[in-house]
Amino acid sequence: MIPVNTPLLSGKEKEYLVECIETGWISSEGPFVKRFEDEMSRFVGRDFGIAVSNGTAALEIAAKAVGISEGDEVIIPTFTIISPAQAVSKLGAKPILIDSDPETWNMDVQKIEERITDKTKAIIVVHIYGLPVDMDPVLQLCEKYDLKLIEDAAELHGQTYNGKLCGSFGDASIFSFYPNKHITTGEGGMIVTNDAEIAEKCRGYRNLCFQPEKRFVHDEIGWNYRMTNMQAALGVAQLEQIDTFIEKKRWIGQLYTSLLSELSDKIELPKQSTDYAENVFWVFGIILKDNVKMNALEVMQRMREFKIGCRPFFYPMHLQPVYNTQGWYVNESYPVAERMAERGFYVPSGLGLTESDINEVVKRLKQILE
Ligand SMILES: *Cc1c(COP(=O)(O)O)cnc(C)c1O
């Protein structure tokens, strides 16, 4: 079996975890939490890091901390995991959707300005699969219309946009440390920011809005979204290896690209680079061209028969039953995202992948498509 993801826990993960157990520090009060926050925020060049229980929690906290509230509109891509959308809708605000750029698979930033209204409060950019969103036009719009900006960098630790690290843009950025991300803590997330006030709010929202002076007196409602010392111990060990992890992701992506190039009449491969970034191939996505009779689900089913785990692409937000039943997006169409969802999937891409795994995946895919 070649699973869609296998993490690589090849550094000091075990040593640091043993330290948690031997010292008895297992809760969020333990010293690895602060250390992971400091090291991760320093890594991306931010002043503050707030470690939380997962990337979705990080988005919820960040959305509230930048001031998104009832009645606001927030611009997000339609092609995304649901986390940014639900961070907005749970606050009583409405996600306004943007179609994808067919080349980079990210939000088409040229389509943002026409969707800005008096109610627009913020933009959430989501870097998808390996290339960052084209940030300069987004930064200009935020400046021009006085909008908040949240950067969802959950998939792109260590990737850069014009030489500047993802996670360093906007009012706040978030990361996920789920096991398929570039660095993992099992479950985990972090908000990073340069704004002391936002950082303070995030710390409060993470911890039930307990107050330092009057602990059980609350001025606001928060969450318990704390990260444990054991998760942070893994995070510190993983961050020590980020450079080799990024190198390995690029090696995987380039090997797949060269081996699959002879199928280029049948499949569309991820773009290698743009003028602002080299693809880091967080996952290796494939889009079936129109001449292939099968759709993505059928190809994935055939791959499963060869014991190879694949995943479908994201399902666009405008087609989500949970939003359609409340009357949202019912007459909206975003053709690029719709096609990607129907025709796209990704092959095993985790850091634990070997060259023979990649050869096997390619061999089976060729067999299925030929
Ligand atoms: C993984 C992911 C998240 C959510 O992170 P969790 O830790 O799984 O909650 C959010 N946004 C993007 C773009 C992701 O890929």
Image (spheres, helix red, strand yellow):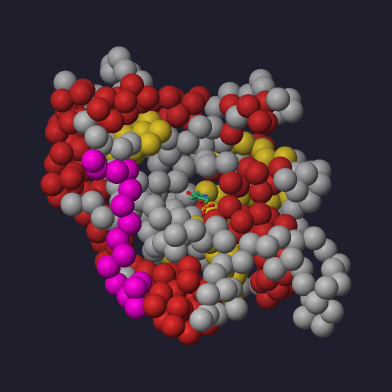
The main secondary structure of the magenta stretch is: loop
Q: Is residue 207 above or below residue 122?
A: below
Residue pushed farthest bottom? 23
Whether residue 6 appears in magenta in the rendering, the answer is yes
The quadrant in which the C terminus is found is top left
Along the viewing direction, whichever of 345 and 47 lies nearer the viewer: 345
Residue 119 found in image quarter:
top right
Q: Is residue 57 above or below residue 164?
A: above
* Residue at 40% from the left image edge and 33% from the top image edge: 312
Residue 13 in view (yes/no): yes
Q: Position of residue 316 (x, y in %)?
A: 54, 32
Q: Is residue 48 above or below residue 364?
A: below
Q: Position of residue 86 (x, y in %)?
A: 65, 44
The quadrant in which the N terminus is found is top left
Q: Position of residue 252 (x, y in %)?
A: 23, 51
Q: Is residue 330 above or below residue 9?
A: above
Q: Position of residue 179 (x, y in %)?
A: 40, 55
* Residue at 67% from the left image edge and 31% from the top image edge: 323
Q: Is residue 307 left or right of residue 162?
A: left
Residue 175 in view (yes/no): no
The number of callouts visible is: 0
Q: Where does the magenta region start and end?
A: 1-15
Residue 271 found in image quarter:
top left
Along the viewing direction, whichever of 239 and 231 lies nearer the viewer: 231
Whether residue 241 appears in magenta in the rendering, the answer is no
Q: Is residue 312 left or right of residue 319?
A: left
* Residue at 80% from the left image edge and 77% from the top image edge: 215
* Residue at 52% from the left image edge and 42% from the top image edge: 81
